[in-house]
Image (cartoon, rainbow, N blue to C red):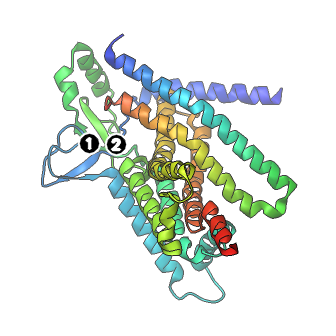
Amino acid sequence: MTDEGLRFVAMALAIGLGAIGPGAGIGVVFSGALQAMGRNPEAEGMLRTYMFLGFALAEVPFILSLVFGLLIGFSII
Amino acid sequence: MRIRNAVLVALAIGAVMYFGLGLVFPREDLHISVKAEALVCIGGEMGYPGECKSGFPITNSLVTTVIVDLLLILMIVFGARNAQMVPRGFQNFVELVVGTFYDFAVGVDKKNVAKFFPFAATAFLLIILSNFIGLMPGAGSIGMCQPYAKAAAEGGEAEHHAANYYAERGWPLTCEPGELLVPFLRAPSADLNMTLALGLISVVLIQYFGLKALGWEYLVRFFNFREGPMFTVIGFIELISEVIRIVSFAFRLFGNIFAGEVVLVVLAHLFPYMLPLPFYAFEVFVAAMQAVIFSVLTLVFMSMATQAHGGHDDAEHGAAAH
């Protein structure tokens, strides 16, 4: 396998494997928030704030893997 | 049974269109550019298509950004001119958009909403409009042809054959062989420069509001040497996460919008006539969702930055009690 081909495989692996955890994590965040909103609709405003906060935190690993995937794929590192 | 028939009919129509129209309209090679392509180079000359050898590049995403800016300014000017107590016509629409988002912002932080709202609403309107313009038919598909220097250099026999093939069936809508299409319009959020700028502005404003609300006490959350080594480490992590916020703001928007465009282009290349439709609808949803996420995250981070550091607050209360 050529060096360039290996780079593309590495990029695909980085992005694909990095998407597993955040995908599950974001699902957990939103399901928890929806359940809480269903049980206590009064707290929806506050819950929405923390829901988006949790979403942002859970998505960081995927964004890092995306960045590193692009860095590898375009042979910057 | 009826559903099955409908699906079969749709598939048949799709197949007929695929083979029938495929004869009329030749398809171009797939070409995806991660960065925005330059249309004009001010004071320089073009090199590889979409790149400037020298000079200041005017990229297609810059053109779209200017169009979006003009649209927004016109919208607000016409909506807010002769503002009446009882809104009529276009003022209704502008009030609806701004008012809906204002109610949303009040839900995030009621106390400081007047300070945070201007930037968050501006970012929201800018991002949602630019995403929608990037999805408009014609954006990304209408452009000018620039010579593809690399292909001419490497072009072997196969390339030459393909060139003749397309030249014979030439439709004015396709580029000459050996040339690449550089679109006039490209979604601004599909350009990393734009999203990085938005992320930088957002994070700098977050620090500004934090410093303004708490004074130098704001920095205690990053450099906390008073409450033991544990909090020092946490402060260090907070400092890193502040930097990562820039990256995550920039790449979340860029990744979502650019990936959406790539999906649409690839699907349109594989099967041009019906398959991209549901994905197009999904991309419209994503375009609106990303604008909401960007502005709400900005609001949430700003609201968190203006709240006093939790552990420190307790320590202050303890000191007061003593």
Task: Reply above or below: B213 against A27.
Answer: below
Q: Which numbered marker is on residue B75?
A: none
Is B257 left or right of B110, judged from the image as shown?
A: left
Quick check: can you spot residue B256?
Answer: yes
Q: Quadrant of residue B16?
A: top right
Name the residue beneath numbered marker 2: B35
Name the residue rendered at 78%, 50% in the picture: A34
Disc 2 chain ID = B
Q: Position of residue B22 (x, y in %)?
A: 46, 27
Name the residue beneath numbered marker 1: B50
Please state, as top left, top right, bottom left or bottom right, where the C terminus of chain B lies in the image: bottom right
Q: Position of residue B201 (x, y in %)?
A: 42, 62
Quick check: can you spot residue B28?
Answer: no
Q: Position of residue B57 (x, y in %)?
A: 23, 52
| Foreground: disc 1 or disc 2 | 2
Mark 1 is on which residue type? Answer: Gly
Is B308 left or right of A68, judged from the image as shown?
A: right
Name the residue rendered at 49%, 23% in the picture: A13
Mark 2 is on which residue type? Answer: Lys
Along the viewing direction, whichever of B234 and B185 lies nearer the viewer: B234
